[in-house]
Image (cartoon, helix red, strand yellow):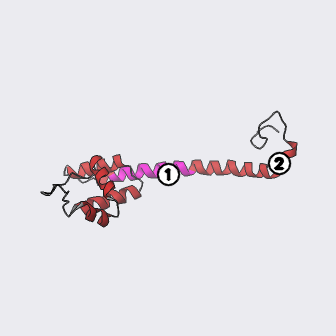
Amino acid sequence: MRIGDLADAGGVTAKTIRYYEQAGLMPAPPRTSGGYRDYPPEATTRLAFIRDAQHAGLTLAEIRGILALRDGGQAPCVHVTDLIDQHLEEIDRRIAELRTTRTALRTLAHRAAETDPATCAEDGICTIFSTQP
């Protein structure tokens, strides 16, 4: 199948597929006598995997690693499980940081609501951020 057909089937652009080839995610397909890329049917499965893995938050490097395992004849399930666990840990860490930031911002919002700009001292920048009474 030609690149446009693969792009339509995968919900991506032809430019994306060419990029995936350059990045080592998609193998270079054989060419027709006219020089057009001629993708095998299984290319749609690989493209769908790449898209789904990206939507799950995996990086292209991580996806490349998974594909390399599979291309080498090894089932990548253990590796994928480890990657998922790592991403979940990172998300949990980021959520904790966001909760801390939200608490700090709520404190600042309360302080800002009670601040009278007329009472701001000229020697400071903004009393809302000041930790001094």
Mark 1 highlights which residue? Answer: 91
Q: What is the distance, in whole Å, between disc 1 and disc 2 at their CAs?
A: 35 Å
Q: Is residue 16 magenta?
A: no
Q: Which callout, 1 or 2, points at the residue further toward the start of the chain?
A: 1
Q: Which mark is residue 115?
A: 2
Residue type, mark 2 in image: Thr
Q: Residues within 10 Å of mark 2 (few under 14, many from 20)?
A: few
Q: Is residue 32 left or right of residue 49?
A: left
| Residue 124 on image: x %, y % | 79, 35
Q: Position of residue 110 (x, y in %)?
A: 77, 52
Q: Secondary structure at mark 1?
A: helix
Pointer 1: residues within 10 angstroms few (<14), some, or many (20+)?
A: few
Q: Residue furthest left?
A: 33
Q: Which residue type does callout 1 highlight?
A: Ile
The residues colored magenta run 80-95
At x 35% / y 59%, what residue is drawn?
Answer: 51
Picture quadrant where residue 6 is located:
bottom left
The percent coordinates of residue 8 (x first, y second) are 31, 66
- Vertical order, 2 against 25 (above or below): below
User: Total of numbered circles in the picture?
Assistant: 2
Residue located at (59% from left, 50% from top): 98
